[in-house]
Amino acid sequence: MLFTGFVLVPIGVAGVYSLYSWNGFGPLTDFVGLKNYVEALSGDVFQSAIGHNLIIASLSIIVQLPLSIGLALLLNRKLRGRAFLRMVVFAPYVLSEAVTAVIWLLMLQPGGFVDQVLRNVGLGGLVQQWLADPAIVLYTLFVVITWKYIGFGVILLLAGLQGVPSELREAAALDGATAWQTTRHVVLPLLGPTIRVWIFLSVIGSLQLFDLVWIMTLGGPANASTTMATYLIDHGFKRYEFGFGSAVAVILFIICFTFALFYQRFALRRDTEGALTRAVS
């Protein structure tokens, strides 16, 4: 009942709104059928927004995942001040997206903290218009996203590492395996289920990316950092095109739902069918 009321009904209502040209005021009278969907999917800005979401998702897997695994393996070792280091890595995740966006927005201003640090260490030639250059703004945002969310990935992987029996590492060492071979053939396969969950959460989060982008760039400059969610809000709430915005919301939902179904079918399902056992056998 709750699932129907809070999930299925809103989706159905958005689907109905998406079939009308509606500014949010008055009754639904101007039925346009699938016109909103056609305009959204054929628009250059929305197509580029989908591309931006996919770039962020790809970079998350290519950059954030190895970095998270490396930090988790490091922080799983017995180090002096390990608890403090874990807290430092996880601290950015505790901050709200709004606070994070404002902090980095100020630091990335021309002549701001980041520029001053680069100049002080002799790297002034690397100073850029971090949030005003269409060529790099998306990658600048990715750095901020990584800073914000990598702590969550590290904590998730650290939890997964606690489930790796120490006896297996000791047996591998007795068999003459190096530290890298033990990590490659024992630890990482056993960490597979956690990694797959991290990938799922990371991709879904990348597809739904909104807060940081909206506060830091509003999708600009020249739509260079527009995502599907910022495109939705821009048209739905700023331009009062609620029918069109609902169509974009339905498209975003279909993309996320389709990915979730396929990922569950071909990736997460492996963890319940003995793939993990086979991987280390």
Image (cartoon, rainbow, N blue to C red):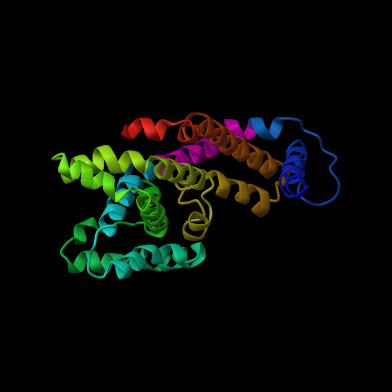
| Residue 120 vertical position relative to residue 23 in the rendered view, above or below | below
Q: Give the side of residue 142 with respect to residue 232, left or right.
A: left
Q: Residue at x 43, y 46 (%)?
A: 198
| Residue 62 vertical position relative to residue 86 in the rendered view, above or below | above
> Residue 203: image x %, image y %?
47, 42
> Residue 146: image x %, image y %?
38, 54
**Frontmost residue, 262 versus 241:** 262
Q: What is the tally of numbered marks visible in this picture? A: 0
Q: What is the quadrant of residue 123 in the picture?
A: bottom left
- From this viewpoint, is residue 202 visible? yes
Magenta stretch mostly in which secondary structure? helix
Q: Give the side of residue 9 with respect to residue 117, left or right.
A: right
> Residue 17: image x %, image y %?
76, 41
Magenta stretch, residue numbers: 39-58
Q: What is the quadrant of residue 20 in the picture?
A: top right
Q: Residue at x 48, y 57 (%)?
A: 212
Q: Quadrant of the C terminus?
A: top left
Q: Residue at x 20, y 57 (%)?
A: 125
Residue farthest along the left direction in this orientation? 176
- From this viewpoint, is residue 112 visible? no
| Residue 47 vertical position relative to residue 158 in the rendered view, above or below | above
Q: Is residue 2 magenta?
A: no
Q: Is residue 49 magenta?
A: yes
Q: Residue at x 22, y 43 (%)?
A: 171
Q: Give the side of residue 86 with respect to residue 18, left or right.
A: left
Q: Give the side of residue 104 with respect to residue 26, left or right.
A: left
> Residue 74: image x %, image y %?
25, 56
Q: What is the quadrant of residue 62 in the picture?
A: top left
